[in-house]
Amino acid sequence: MPSLWKRLTFSFATLLYVLSATLLLVALATERWVSGRILCGTGAELVSANCSELDKFTGHIYYGLFQGQKTRRCGLGNRSTKIYIFPTLVHTLNTGLHVMVIVFLLVAVGFTLLSLSFSIYNARKVPYQSIKGPTGLYIWNTIAGVFGSLAVLCFLAAVRHHRLTERVSNYQENLFHFSILDERLDWSFWLGVASIATHGVVCVVVAMSRIKLPKPQNKKQSEQPTVTAEVLMY
């Protein structure tokens, strides 16, 4: 049976693993990886819009790894369109890079769950093999963090170097062309980053589990019989 300190630290590590896996799954399922403003350049050129009139041609877009939404304004009011990355839009993007982001995130979730099981085991029992103890936790935790980092880096490469937002906004647009006024990484992306940071915290917690706290020593004071006058009489 592990000591109380080890049970506390590994229990806290277990909670962190649950948090990390939850953050990754929420990031995968939500649509706010990137958001931004798009300009309907074709409509603005047709009416020779000046700077004060560009707001009439400025729409919004946001998307995730699987779907999103685009609100375009080309002088005829707002028109919202649902964006579905799969199965057709992905072929106009850098398909390999986009699929790698999803695969890396799923692998990170898998190794996070594996680390979770090892953390629960260490909180309940003393491992008899090093791979089942803190060493194993370091290994699986590091692998999960590395794959999460690779997913984030691949997505950044797709956005910054492969003009992901521009390709998504102009998909199936035959009459109008949209330019990106600004784009930013939204909260779904930062959930993935927070999950990676959680793995770093776990490493610190696991390292703390090896700290040996001093055991309280109960000094038993020997009770010496009190010699009284009555005792001496006998």
Image (spheres, grey):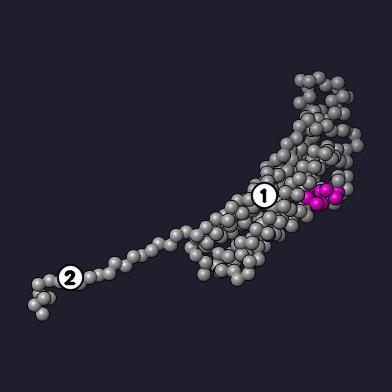
Q: Residue 45: within the magenta?
A: no
Quarter occupied by residue 120: bottom right
Using the numbered discs, state the Cα–Cα distance from disc 1 to disc 2 in whole angstroms: 67 Å
Name the residue located 74 percent from the left edge and 57 percent from the top edge.
Answer: 107
Residue type at mark 2: give it.
Answer: Thr
Q: Secondary structure at mark 1?
A: helix
Please report the bounds of the magenta region as a residue range.
Answer: 95-101
Say which residue label 1 marks: 196
Say which residue label 2 marks: 226
Q: Main secondary structure of the magenta part?
A: helix
Pinpoint residue 176: horizontal percent, then vertical percent: 88, 33
Position of the C terminus, as image quadrant, is: bottom left
Check the image and report above or below for 56 versus 13. Answer: above
Pinpoint residue 167: horizontal percent, then vertical percent: 85, 40
Label placed on residue 205: none
Instruction: Give the label, 1 or 2, closer to the camera.
Output: 2
**Marks 1 and 2, the one that precedes in the sequence:** 1
Between residue 111 and residue 75, name the one nearer to us: 111
Residue type at mark 1: give it.
Answer: Ile
147 on left or right of 231: right
